[in-house]
Image: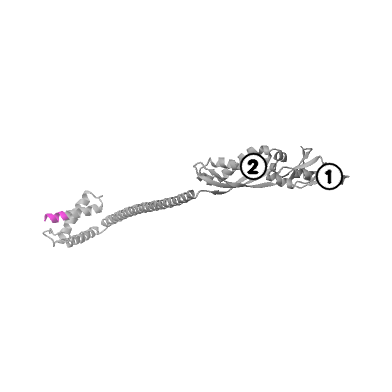
Amino acid sequence: MLRTLCRTGGALLQQTQRTVPRLWVTPAQQRWASSLPMNTVVLFVPQQEAWVVERMGRFHRILEPGLNFLIPLLDRIRYVQSLKEIVIDVPEQSAVSLDNVTLQIDGVLYLRILEPFKASYGVEDPEYAVTQLAQTTMRSELGKLTLDKVFRERESLNSNIVHSINQASDDWGIRCLRYEIKDIHVPPRVKESMQMQVEAERKKRATVLESEGTREAAINVAEGRKQAQILASEGQKAEQINKAAGEASAVLAKAEAKSKAIRMLSDALTEQNGNAAASLSVAEQYVSAFSNLAKESNTILLPSNTGDISGMVTQAMSIYGALAKTSPKAAPEVVEDKNEEHVNQSTSSQ
């Protein structure tokens, strides 16, 4: 009895499918209708599929994956919806950008059926509806951008198209996961102008980089000269400081040596036979001064008694004695200088 009922139900189902008018069936529905399973009472639904069951022409339930039971003649499997991610090629179409450039663009649409009931009864052909919506949305979004921004902002363009599709496809139980633009074709003249623009931009960058390099080189040379002059001036300053310090040290050393010599001379004059030593020193200086005559100038002044060395020494010693009596605490050097001055004055007067 059960076998007879199953055969009768299957025959009726096949007859009903054959009597469906071809003019009212879309290509997607033809594909699903050709693979609709028959009601054999016991059914096994594959994973990631949803079978929509109608009872006496009215929606009854959706079969879950696994074992299911149906009533022959009353229950009918009307739609089979795949819950996997579906990939749809969006045909190439023309669109006009914001700067009035006609583009040929195509894409790929990725979607998934989330609610089989809405996908079955909400729209006649879900795939066709989503494809047309993607095309119209892409044309409207391209009309908001210029040609340059279309190439630079492809990611934002894809996200805007996905957002617009999801707003309209919520009533269909379909969720658009992503949309990718495959190819963008521009007219040949526009392509040539774009290539010329790219070449001009590259030449501009090369010129700018070259000028920046020249500027950097000039700045580096000027900085080098500046540093060299600063270092040279610092070297001259250090040299002058060292030279002045050396001269000061030399003057101090000479002054100390001279002071020591004066002390030694004063000590020597206070000793025994000091006057004789002073007389000898005056005589030596007289002879040395006389020998240097006529070396630095052509004018020569000679005393009347140039050969009387003893008289000159005696006169110098008498002057030294007179000065020593008046200022016994005077430095021997001062006395010696005054003696020399007196000798020179007497020589010039004679």
Q: Indicate which label's residue lies in the foreground, 1 or 2.
A: 1
Q: Residue at x 12, y 54 (%)?
A: 349
Local secondary structure at mark 2:
helix
Residue 83 visible in the picture: no
Report the number of numbered marks: 2
Mark 2 = which residue?
Answer: 130
Q: What is the magenta range?
A: 344-350
Dot 2, crowdedness within 10 Å: few (<14), some or many (≥20)?
many
Find residue 159 and report its image quarter.
Answer: top right
| Colouring used for the render | one colour
Local secondary structure at mark 1:
helix
| Percent position of residue 193, x then y | 46, 49
For this rendering, which residue is in front, 104 or 220?
A: 104
On the rendered structure, is 199 left or right of 222?
right
Dot 1, crowdedness within 10 Å: few (<14), some or many (≥20)?
few
On the rendered structure, is 169 left or right of 102?
right
Label 1 or label 2, whichever comes before in sequence order: 1
| Percent position of residue 232, x then y | 35, 54
Q: Residue at x 66, y 41 (%)?
A: 175
Find residue 39 and report its image quarter.
Answer: top right
Amino acid type indicated by mark 2:
Val
| Percent position of residue 340, x then y | 19, 55
Mark 1 = which residue?
Answer: 8
